[in-house]
Amino acid sequence: MPELPEVEVVRAGLEPAVSGALVTGVEVLEPRSLRRHLAGAEDFERRLVGRRLAGAVRRGKFLWLPVEASPDEAPIALLGHLGMSGQLLLRAPGAEPDRQLRIRIGLEHPEHGELVVAFADQRIFGSLALDPLVPTADGAAGGLGWSASLVPEHVAHIARDPLDPAFDDDAFVDRLLARRTGLKRALLDQTLVSGIGNIYADEALWAARLHYEAPTASLRRPVVRRLLAEVRSVLTRALADGGTSFDAQYVNVNGASGYFSQRLNAYGRQGRPCPRCGRPIVREAFMNRSSHLCPFCQRRPRALAQAREGTSLAAK
DNA sequence: AGCGAGCCCTGCGCGC
DNA sequence: TGCGCGCAGGGCTCGC
């Protein structure tokens, strides 16, 4: 579910509440939400309770809360990924349990007093884990929200996102042009560029008038640069609106929805008019998901169209 | 290198 | 009303 803007809203909401807070208790209600913490729930709880959290950091769709350094342990962080339906909520200690509550983390903050970080997740594709921090490959800060050049081990292979000051535009363009794949597939590849999911890929492609199956190798450099600018633009605008909420699945740390769904031009708008040309937006199957596009504004590349015709003729 | 398939899951809305 | 189906903001692993 949540893509970069939604995860950033959550990070920004957590930051003031968790920075400097002591972990007073951990309650694991659903062990499957720790599937990426291989040592299990008991280990997770034992190593987290009594530790102090140092902030909230994000790279792409990954979020982590660094644990304050201890003299007898290598640096670690509480790593979270929301998957398709995960939420991190800030609650008062006595509050009613949230729907699909999986893990509760009790905190004592020097200024804000007692509070609870509740991890709720309908589909259990998301997870929390304690992960060792390792140095970043480029020496720059690990992500947004913290100056240390450290990143959780399980995030080390994830590319920087387009809102990261250390994102290298030229390197991204070079790497994308070197791929032999379809354009949307490349945008969704978190090892090439992170933070983009199905919604913002469709929105950026619509804005740049590019077809999702355009072969990456066929593109010209300025076209890729323009696409990157559109990616940044849509991520930034969505963030300013508090993210995209279609239902109660995505909410900020206080349980409130974002408003960017009202500004979507292509995603989820099949059958409705393209805001640019008025012709209907269509939905097509793609990677066991969907792509939404305006077939007029976003023409299928000719070489690909011919190949398709060839295939269908051959099939007859 | 890249891709498709399979897997990890729950719950909602729809048509019958 | 009940049931089956398709659908959903993600990502990891494996075999080809």
Image (tube, coloured by chain):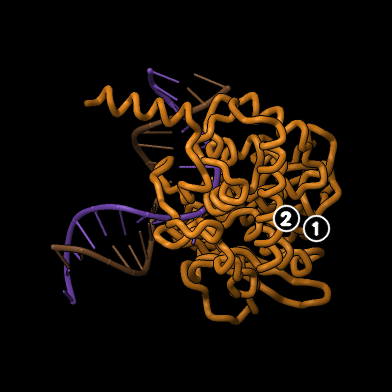
Chain colours: A orange, B brown, C purple
> Which residue is situated farthest in the front direction here?
A277
Decide which of A250, A245 is in the foreground and name it.
A245
Quadrant housing residue A254 = bottom right
Q: Going 50% across and 41% down the picture, which residue do you hit?
A: A299
Q: Residue A159 vs residue A138: left or right?
A: left
Q: Going 60% across and 54% down the picture, which residue do you hit?
A: A3
| Marked residue chain, label 2 | A
Q: Residue A227 vs residue C14: left or right?
A: right
> Counting other residues with Cα less than 10 Å from the Cα at mark 2, is it few (<14), some (14-19), or many (20 or more)?
many
Whole-angstrom CA distance, mark 1 to mark 2, is 7 Å
Question: Circle 2 is placed at which residue position?
Answer: A65
The vertical placement of A5 against A59, above or below, is below
In this rendering, does residue A259 appear at all? yes
The kind of residue on which mark 1 rests is Ala
Quadrant housing residue A308 = top left
Image location of residue A262, percent across then percent down: 56, 69
Image location of residue A89, percent across then percent down: 61, 69
Question: Circle 1 is placed at which residue position?
Answer: A54
| Marked residue chain, label 1 | A
Q: Going 76% across and 53% down the picture, which residue do you hit?
A: A67
Image location of residue A59, percent across then percent down: 70, 48
Image location of residue A208, percent across then percent down: 62, 46
Where disc 2 sits, the SS reads: strand
Q: Quadrant of the C terminus of chain A?
A: top left
Contact flag, marks 1 and 2 (Cβ < 8 Å)? yes
Q: Are marks 1 and 2 on the same chain?
A: yes
Earlier along the polypeptide chain: callout 1 or callout 2? 1
In this rendering, does residue A153 appear at all? no
Decide which of A178, A111 is in the foreground and name it.
A178
The kind of residue on which mark 2 rests is Leu
